[in-house]
Amino acid sequence: MSRPDPTQAGLTTLPQWQALQQHFAAIGPLQLRELFAADPQRGERLVIEDIGLYLDYSKQRVDADTLRLLRELAVACALPQRIEAMFRGDKINSTEGRAVLHVALRAPATEKILVDGHDVVPDVHEVLDRMAAFSERVRSGAWLGHTGKRIRNVISIGIGGSDLGPVMAYEALRDYSRRDMTFRFVSNVDSTDFAEAVRDLDAAETLFIVCSKTFTTLETLSNAHAARAWSVAALGDEKSVAKHFVAVSTNADGVAKFGIDTANMFGFWDWVGGRYSMDSSIGLSTMLAIGADGFREMLAGFHAMDEHFRHAPLEKNLPVLMGMLAVWNNNFLDAATVAVLPYEQYLKRFPAYLQQLTMESNGKHVTLDGATVDYNTGPIYWGEPGTNGQHSFYQLIHQGTRIVPCDFIGFGQTLNPLPAQGGGDQHDLLMANLIAQGEALAFGKTAGEVRAEGTPEALVPHRMFEGNRPSTTILAAKLTPHILGTLIALYEHSVFVQGVIWDIDSFDQWGVELGKQLAKTTIAELVAAHEPKLAHDSSTNALIRRYRQLRDDAISGKA
Ligand code: F6P
């Protein structure tokens, strides 16, 4: 789908874009110190608090005009209409001719969402109910393995969107999970990943969930075959597959061909993108870990953000604000990356999850019409939990030559309180660090302040902080399944907002194809009995030869 108004030739020619450029030329040198000094209430005004989240964007390098101009750009790019088009089920993933309806995965049963005239909401709830019944049987011990033992280990096999969401959600919600069960995740085609996952497990107590939207993904099928071989070898009976393997896929034929009874398959639909699928049946491991009620709480959290995104006015709309600030930082401040810094150990895999969500979605170089863009699109997302990152890469964020906008995420309460030396608890220490980092980034420390501390003159440049480094702080009361859903949906919709402004298809991923295609040729060349005639570039040819030699020497004991 191209921009609704065909007179809009391109983003950078829009008067609203040009107005932002002129505005940036004026505001560019402005310091956060000055913005705060001029408006003592800024830290309370530039905040949105809704649906359990408190989002402080006062430390972004924006003023009232910036925010107004960004909203005008959003309107010029038909953002409100594009939001409606997504929720209506229009085929906004134009290069794949698909609707984009992850919002339907968390819609209450009373809603109606049509895809090609068919209401998909009852289908979603039918699968959810089957997942709940299955999870209950496994968790209660009613579902037994082939030898009559109950299932104590669950291994989810998948990659990309069929792995990163489930891993992140399991880690995030560990505190709510069944502690008497083991949950592991296998994604890499590197056989070490599978070997380490099963090395101490009893196959008689182990259930595999094979997760693949397409059921054609090389890594997942390789690992699923390895799992079946391991399980059948231990249990001594092909028939054991029926009790130890279930599948999550849109491809029933592929599942049946692999040898999993489709009665043990949980479906989803082509209108759910892989990276937007953790709240579909791809989240079966999450439901097994936290139970059906916990999973439904998480869905309710997603849905609360969906409703907010659809109905809140632009100026109070959390994903719209976050998305537009991302555009501002990316295209005007020229910040190439965003650091996501959760001060919550349970969110340790959140940055990795966001990497696929953001970069597979918005790492595109052509518009919906196929024209090459003349502006930067998706920034690089990365991050680690605080406070660990502080002792690693924060140096560059504070004093390096690049601007790295930061998203700080923290909670009012820890799920694991421990007393700290000197009063308070360790959670207060954690949050003191989060708050202090945003302050240090924004306001820095001037040369005068450094000198006033008695610093020798030669060290003054080294010890000063120029500040003016933007950050957003997101706070919530406590990490719960509900708030996790809300937080994920915040980023999902922020990614959508950015994609609308950049006029790209945030829901395809053609960029992953070339490497997959070339690997097929390469594998044949690696496994050929004699070195085949190689017709790649000289580097690729040499690497193939060198690998064959290293492998053959290692196998023959020469190495
Ligand atoms: O190669 C990228 C990708 O297609 C992702 O978009 C997707 O999440 C992942 O592979 C896994 O795909 P599948 O679920 O079909 O195995």
Image (spheres, grey):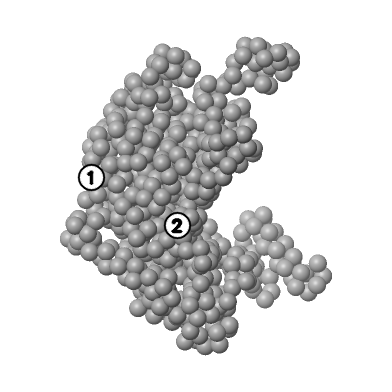
Mark 2 crowd level (few <14, some 14–19, many ≥20, 10 Å Cα): some
Amino acid beneath label 2: Tyr
Q: As drawn, is 192 to the left or to the right of 80? A: right
Residue 207 coordinates in the image, percent (x, y): 48, 74
Q: As drawn, is 190 to the left or to the right of 63? A: right
Up/down of 383 relative to 138, above or below: above
Q: Quadrant of residue 190?
A: bottom right
Foreground disc of the pair 1, 2: 2
Q: Quadrant of residue 266?
A: bottom left
Q: Is residue 168 visible?
A: no
Look at mark 1 in the image and give the residue it sits on: 84
Q: As drawn, is 131 to the left or to the right of 550? A: left
Q: Residue at x 59, y 19 (%)?
A: 445
What kind of element bears circle 2? Answer: helix
Which mark is first along the chain, 2 or 1?
A: 1
Residue nearer the viewer, 100 or 156: 156
Q: As drawn, is 22 to the left or to the right of 464? A: left
Amino acid beneath label 1: Glu
Task: Name the disc covering residue 35, or none.
Answer: none
What kind of element bears circle 1? Answer: helix
Residue nearer the viewer, 478 or 125: 478
Q: Is residue 422 visible?
A: yes
| On-image quarter of the C terminus | bottom right
Residue 360 coordinates in the image, percent (x, y): 45, 50
Residue 43 coordinates in the image, percent (x, y): 41, 24
Residue 510 coordinates in the image, percent (x, y): 43, 54
Please, which residue is most extreme toward the right here?
558
Q: Residue at x 43, y 70 (%)?
A: 139
Look at mark 2 in the image and give the residue it sits on: 176
Q: Residue at x 50, y 85 (%)?
A: 147
Q: How many marks?
A: 2
